Image (cartoon, rainbow, N blue to C red):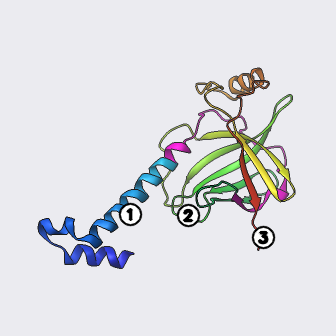
Amino acid sequence: MRGKMISAVLCCSGATAWRNPEFVALRKKMISALLLALAIAAGSGCDFTAPLVTTPSIPMDQSLAGLWQSMQTGGPADKLLLLPLGPLEMLVSYPAGKEDAMFARASLWRGSELTLVQLQWLGTARGVLPQDPRVFQFASYKLDGGSLSIRLLNAEIVPKDATTAGELARAIEKLRDDKNLFRPVLEFRRVKH
């Protein structure tokens, strides 16, 4: 693809360059890829500035480690990679193996009747670091053999403006019975090697 781009740029000059069919097709692909990356980045935006966990203390379920594939229909299946960083944290990559993959550190938070995974987004596979202080997301999960269900906390229900862990924890606890507390479920299945 890179060779095509270079040859399209080198062989085309002046006003005819923009009309060359090979160049036009390549330009459309590049614009589509850029728009897709922007849509993914916008849709995967982080929600909160305050962490629930500052020092991890709850062991992560090590059986989560591995490569998972989404079970979405109507498009390519994204992969989720979970790697242990020790007994209390995991490294998350999503969509794993892609140029626009994002990386997060995961740890557990336990409230009175609710356990959540805290995701602190660190950056992307291209080396782009977060520019916004909203680097935290929280999720519940259910592991059932070879399938993993994840539900992200709904930032439209839980106030995004919480500035401390205590304030955020109280808001979550207060809303724990709300049927809209979480976004729709994301389903993954373990990739066998």
Q: Position of residue 10 (x, y in %)?
A: 22, 77
Q: Earlier in the sequence, mark 3 or mark 2?
A: 2
Name which residue type carries label 2.
Answer: Lys
Q: Which residue is mark 3?
A: 192
Magenta stretch: residue 56 in it? yes
Q: Residue furthest left?
A: 14
In terms of secondary structure, what is the magenta stretch mainly?
Answer: loop
Magenta stretch: residue 138 in it? no
Q: Nearer the viewer, residue 90 or 149?
A: 149
Q: Tag 3: Cα neighbours inside 10 Å, few (<14), some, or many (≥20)?
A: few
Q: Position of residue 66 (x, y in %)?
A: 76, 63
Secondary structure beneath dot 3 equals: loop
Quarter-of-image position of residue 28: bottom left
C-alpha span from label 1 to label 2: 16 Å
Q: Tag 2: Cα neighbours inside 10 Å, few (<14), some, or many (≥20)?
A: some
**Which region of the structure is painted magenta?**
41-70
Quarter-of-image position of residue 190: bottom right
The residue lying at 78 percent from left, 43 percent from top is: 108
Q: Is residue 130 visible?
A: no
Residue 141 in the figure: left or right of residue 14: right
Q: Nearer the viewer, mark 3 or mark 2?
A: 3
> Against 141, is 26 above or below?
below
C-alpha span from label 3 to label 1: 32 Å
Residue 142 in the figure: left or right of residue 14: right
Q: Which residue is mark 2?
A: 98
Q: Earlier in the sequence, mark 1 or mark 2?
A: 1
Mark carried by residue 29: 1
